[in-house]
Structure formats: C-alpha cells, structure tokens
Amino acid sequence: MNPMVQRPTQVAEEDEGELAALRLRLRESEAERQRLQAQLVDRNTELKSLHHQLDHLMHKVSHDLRAPVRHITSFTPLVREMLAEGEDPSDCLDTMDKSARHLSSMIDALLALARLARAEKNPSEVCLRSLVSEVQRDVLEQEQTGRQVEWRIAPDLPTVQGDVGLLREMWGHLLSNALKFSRKCAVTQIEIGWLPASAQQNDTAHPNPAGPDGPTFYVQDNGAGFNPEFADQLFGLFQRLHRASEYEGTGLGLALARQIVILHGGHISARGALNQGCRISFSLPAS
C-alpha cells in the first residue's frame, strides 16, 4: 500500500474519532445544562411557595400572638388600680399568668417549626415496625394515665426511605394526637395500618393522598373527631378545632407532622366527623 495514501486515511480516522468524542461531550453538556435548568425552575417554584407560606405564617402568627399580649397589657392597669384600692387582684393575675404561659408555648412552637425548616435530611432505610413500637412506648409513658387503650398495629409495617429522627418525631405527634383526642372514650381504640401501592387503586374508601406512588399509612382513633367542613384547617399552624379548655396544646403537632411528611416528598390528609374519630393518612417513599 502506498504510504502517502495510508497516512491521510489515519489522520481522517483520528479526526473523525475526535469529532465523535466532541459530539458526545456536547450532548452530555447539553443534558447537564437541561438538568440544572430544571433544578433551577424547581427551586424557583419552591421559593415562591415558601414566600407565600411565609407571608401567611407572619399574618397568622402576628394575629395569634396579639391575643395573650392583649390580655397582659389590658389587665396590668386594672391590677394597679385594684392594689391601690386595697382589692385582691388574684383573678387578674391568674389570667395574666395563663396568657404569659400561652405566649411562651407559642414562641416555643415557632422555634420548633423554625428548627424543622432548617433540618437536613439524613435518609436511610427505616423499619417502621420497630420505630412505631418505640414511639408507642414513649407516648404511652407521657399520655396514658390509667386509661384503657386498645392498639391495633399492622404487624407487617414496611421499611421506608427517610430520616429516622424526623420520622420518629412525626409518629410521636400523630400518636400523641390520637391519644389526646380520645381520652374521653371509655375504651380508646387506635389503629395503625398501611396500604401498599398495588392495593390503593382498589381502595376507594381511603384513597392514597399522594397517588399510587408509594405506600400509604394511617392512624385512626375513635375520639372526638372534627367537623369535616374544617378539614383543611387541621394541619394549620396554631389551628384548633376544639376548645382549649377541653384539650390542651398549641395546635402545632399536626402542623409539624405535615411539614415532615412534605420534607419526605409525601402528602397528608385527614378524614373524620364529630364524635366519630379521626383518620390521618399520609404517604412516604418506599424503600
């Protein structure tokens, strides 16, 4: 073969190889650019949603914090007047003390919400059967005082992907909520179960709030329930659907549980009726 012919052929093949490699790098760069652009769009959407939530939160918090402050400031001059006239201001002081304590608990709740907003997930495989059993023991020590409580817990709770600390906190809020609002029942009944993705399409009574993407879990009690017309308020910050004189708390537990579910890419919803119990359903990513 003529060496003068072979060399240009080799050069042409090498050039073609370099061009192919360059085209491949260009395609990879374009794919990376599109991926980063999609992430930017998602982040902008998240930021808009966070700004909207922040505006709503600030309006809600400023309104709710004014109530106990109003009690304290309005009763202060009255106490001074009663003391000047030699009257006993104990009732007024009790009201001021309750308002101050309520204000303190609301501030603690806001700090808890802020901590959760800054939390970084450390995902791992979490065995819910073991986790729920641990949380059940913890909440019973805090909530149960001579009560008769019947637990029905699915023995085959699956393993999910999530942050074990956050999931423990979420289950704690849900089980504490179920125990609190069923304390007036002669026998408290709490059921913890789940539905696999394959079974949810046929369950029209309790559909998956997140769609058929993963397992749906539920906590159901036979307690006070709630008016279904206000179901959308159940997970709101400082929202209470029952009188504070009946059930203590700041109305934060379900709001924190909702945030934890959202952090894990899931959805949460509630079904119930007055004096007919409550069922909280939520989805989590499968392992």
Image: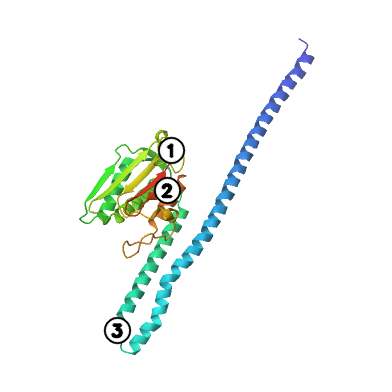
* Contact between labelled residues 2 and 3, with CB atoms less than 8 Å apart: no
Q: Nearer the viewer, residue 44 or 92?
A: 92
Q: Residue at x 29, y 84 (%)?
A: 88
Along the polypeptide, which appears first: circle 1 or circle 2? 1
* Dot label at residue 275: none
Task: Calculate the distance from the C-alpha at mark 3 to the C-alpha at mark 1.
Answer: 62 Å
In the image, which is nearer the foreground, mark 3 or mark 2? 2
Q: Amino acid at mark 2?
A: Ser
Q: Quadrant of residue 70?
A: bottom left
Give the quadrant of the N terminus: top right
Q: Nearer the viewer, residue 134 or 235?
A: 235
Q: Secondary structure at mark 3?
A: loop
Q: Secondary structure at mark 2?
A: strand
Q: Secondary structure at mark 1?
A: loop
Task: Report which residue position mark 2 lands on.
Answer: 269
Image location of residue 40, percent across then percent down: 60, 46
Task: Report which residue position mark 3 lands on.
Answer: 88
User: Crowding at label 3, few (<14), some or many (≥20) Cα neighbours within 10 Å?
Assistant: few
Task: Report which residue position mark 1 lands on.
Answer: 214
User: Crowding at label 2, few (<14), some or many (≥20) Cα neighbours within 10 Å?
Assistant: some
Q: Is residue 161 left or right of residue 89?
A: right
